[in-house]
Structures are given as C-alpha cells and as structure tokens.
Image (tube, rainbow, N blue to C red):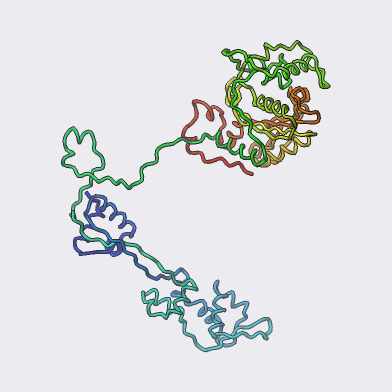
Amino acid sequence: MADALGVEILKLVNENEAIDTVKIASILGKDHQQIVGAVNSLKSVGDVIQTEQLSNKHWELTKEGKLFVEHGSHEACVYEAVPSDGGIKQADLMKTSPNAKIGFSKAMSAGWLIMDKTAEGGPVVKRKVSSIEDKAKSQVMLVQAGQISNIPEKECKELKKRKLIVEVVVKSFKLTKGSDFSLSVSKLETDLTPEMISSGSWKEKNFKAYNFNAMGVMPVSGHLHPLMKVRAEFRQIFLEMGFTEMPTNNYVESSFWNFDALFQPQQHPARDAHDTFFIQDPMYATEFPMEYLERVKKVHSEGGFGSQGHKYDWSIEEAKKNLLRTHTTAVSARMLYKLAQLEEFHPVKYFSIDRVFRNETLDATHLAEFHQIEGVVADYNLALADLIGVLHAFFKKLGIEKLRFKPAFNPYTEPSMEIFSYHEGLKKWVEVGNSGVFRPEMLLPMGLPEGVSVIAWGLSLERPTMIKYGIDNIRELVGHKVNLQMVQENGICRLDK
C-alpha cells in the first residue's frame, strides 16, 4: 500500500481537478521536497497520477533586505543618527552602525546630509533637510508583500544592484488523476521469487515494468595495491628528473651478474643458501660474454686496473649458479656493460623499481620478497659531492629535506654512504637508503672509459608505503593477510613535495 503521505496526496488529487505540489505542501504543512519524493514513489507504481512540471519565479528579500524592513534603510539609519540640532563628527557617525559607510554615501547622494569640513576636531555632518522619506524601505516592503509590479523598473534594478532582493525559481508539479487512479495503491512487485513460481501466486501479482534506460550498478573491479600507487609516484619522480627506466623482468639471474660482475667475492656470506634462493632447475646459466667474463675472473683472482683483487681461485662453476636476484643492481650491471659496448660513451641516468628475493626470516619488517628502488648516473668525473647533490634533489621531491650521510661498506661501491632522514613523528634520525660510487674494479672490466664514474643509490618500496598508509606490519601489506578492503578504500598516493 502507499504510505500515509502518499494517501493524503491521493485524497487531495481526488478532491481537485488539478493541484500543485507547492499548494499540497502548504495544505499538509510539509516540506516541498518531501511532497515531491512521495509523488515520485506514487509514479513508480503505475499510471496512478499524471504529472506536469511547472516553473514559477518570484522575488524574495535577501538577509540585508529583511534588515531594511525591520530597521529601515542604511541611509535612513545614518540620517536618524545625526542630531537635528547641531551635528555629529563624521568619525563618530561611522561608529553608529556596521553599514554606516554605505548609508552615509547614499544619504549624501540623496541630499539629506551636508558636511562641514571647517569645524574644529575634524569634519562634522549635519542634516540638510528636516525630514526624509525612506523610499528603499517602502520598496522592499512591497516586495515582501508580493507587489513588486508596483515598483518602477529602474528602481527595481537598483534594489537588485544593492542585493536587497533575489529572484527565486520554484520547480513544482501539477498533479492530475491517471488512468489507474485509486485511493488505495498496492506496491508493485520488483522480483520474481522461487516461492511465487512454485505456488503460482505470480499470476495474481502486479510487477513493476523494467526501466531499460536506467543505469546499471557498476560491477566490482580491480583496485591498485598501495605498493603500486607509491611505485607510480616514485616512477614519476625519476621521470621528472630525466631518468630512463631499466628493463627488470629478469627475476632469475646468474651468480655472475648478481655477484661477480659487481666485484663481490665468491666467498662472500651473501652467496650462502641461508641468504640467497638458488635455483635447482635449471641450476646453471650457460651464456656469458666470455671476454668480459675473463676480465672479471682476472680482477677477482689476480687484480688489475690498479687493484690487487681478492687473491683467490675464481670458479666459473660458482659464477654459473642460477638464483633469484637479491638486488636490482644486477640489472644495473647488465645495463652498464651494454653501455660500455657502444662505440662512443654518452652519459646516462637509469632507474629501476622491481622485486628482489632474499632468504630472510619473516617478521613484522622483513619478507623474503620485496621491492628495491635504484637510481644510477654514469658520466665523466662524477664524485661523492655529485652523489650528495643528486640525493638531496631526489629526496626533496619526496618531501624529505633533512638528510644525513654515514660512511658504510658495500663490496661494489667505494666510497659508500648510508642515507638517514629525520623522522618528525619519531623525533629521531632513521635510515632511508644506501648509496655509493661504483668501484673501478667493477666498471673498467666492462670496458667503460677511464674517467667515467657511476653514482648509485637504493631504497625499499615497502618502508615508505607502510609509513604513508600507517601500516606497522609488512605482512599486512603483502601476503595472505592483506586486508582487501584496505586496498579498495585507500586513495591515490601523493607524496608531499
């Protein structure tokens, strides 16, 4: 059945040949929009009522116009504030009301007041006429009474210019009886249920017609993971700084490119199975640039290029072992070797953001799989000062300006620096990345010209993402414990710049 308000509307339509929803609202003492909502509900159950949209315009007083009715116009208030015997200082007159300035201007233009600028202590305002007619107040009272037609057009424009009146458009509906008009309306069924089919009751039901023009419900779609949102922001920063993205789809890497090409000795603890995932099938890589491999072997075992090397028997069997890459610096090594094979060297700026794998014990801050962000710049005569300058420019775009650098050790960079930033929330300095200048023992065997230096830095993607989204356990960001609702509801990432 129609609700109580709908029944009241139907009664009024039945009693009148045609009736406006504004009038219905007035009769029933309801808000007009509430009446319109009830009319739309009645329309949805069939041709019970017919509607015709109407548009009515009328003028209403603004808040300032209503003040005119209550207290008089600004100019009349100023006139009344001037004593009939003598006068008042202009400075004191301006304090009599909040709108004294505009009222004084209008009263002077109307010739109601005169100002004596020769008086001691400043200008004095006096009445020029003994009485006034507050025409503006009379006009707004006519508007309030719905008699705006009695106001001359020129003066009506002046009221609009002074923002004392405003035109209001009221959209309403004229209601008449429909072909299925009834004072008792049953709600149309919207669903055909299994119970209706089994009992046969659907034959006696009235069903709501389908609206094929209605917009359907948007299907549930995929959402970007917070890691991907932050990754996109980092990628944009690199591109803004003129960097080129390196191809990083080579998750399985040989020990040669992951360790040996980076001048990392074969006895290094990072090559232990407790730190690195080695591949069983295929266990070994087969293709290497042999001339380059021989130069790498020599610099490891015998030294060269001004270095004494590591002084051990270098094993190609160890270099051939396949593994899941432990850092994207393996990608940088491949790209720098490719650069060295060009006929003429040219400066480059590379970056990569992708997954790396380490045999870590899982806890709140460590996973066996995570993302590494790496930036690499190659040019002649680059030094530590250039690295520090680039790092300041890079981190400034992340909204990080308080940086400190601490000497560190990396097998393939010398000098090396850990990067620290002051965390305003924790009120302490925290490590945010690692950096350094690639060693000549790594670059010269590739065939890069002497005098070419390569500066590089790296940081994780997970840590800034956890800070950005307020996540304190990395297992809630990646893995089977991820809250999919969090992925759906979190907005686009925007790092403060």
Q: Residue furthest front?
A: 343
Any part of residue 221 in sight? yes
Of 337 and 63, nearer the camera is 337
Q: In which quarter of the image is residue 237?
A: top right
Image quarter of the C terminus: top right
Image spot of residue 224 (x, y percent): 51, 35
Image spot of residue 361 (x, y percent): 59, 20
Image spot of residue 196 (x, y percent): 20, 36
Q: Is residue 71 left or right of residue 303?
A: left
The mark tally for this picture is 0
Residue displayed at 19% across by 63% down: 15
Any part of residue 409 in sight? no
Of 260 and 360, nearer the camera is 260
Image spot of residue 119 (x, y percent): 67, 85
Q: Quadrant of residue 429?
A: top right
Of 112 and 355, nearer the camera is 355
Q: In this view, does 435 lie to the left or right of 190?
A: right
Residue displayed at 61% across by 37% down: 235
Residue displayed at 46% across by 35% down: 222
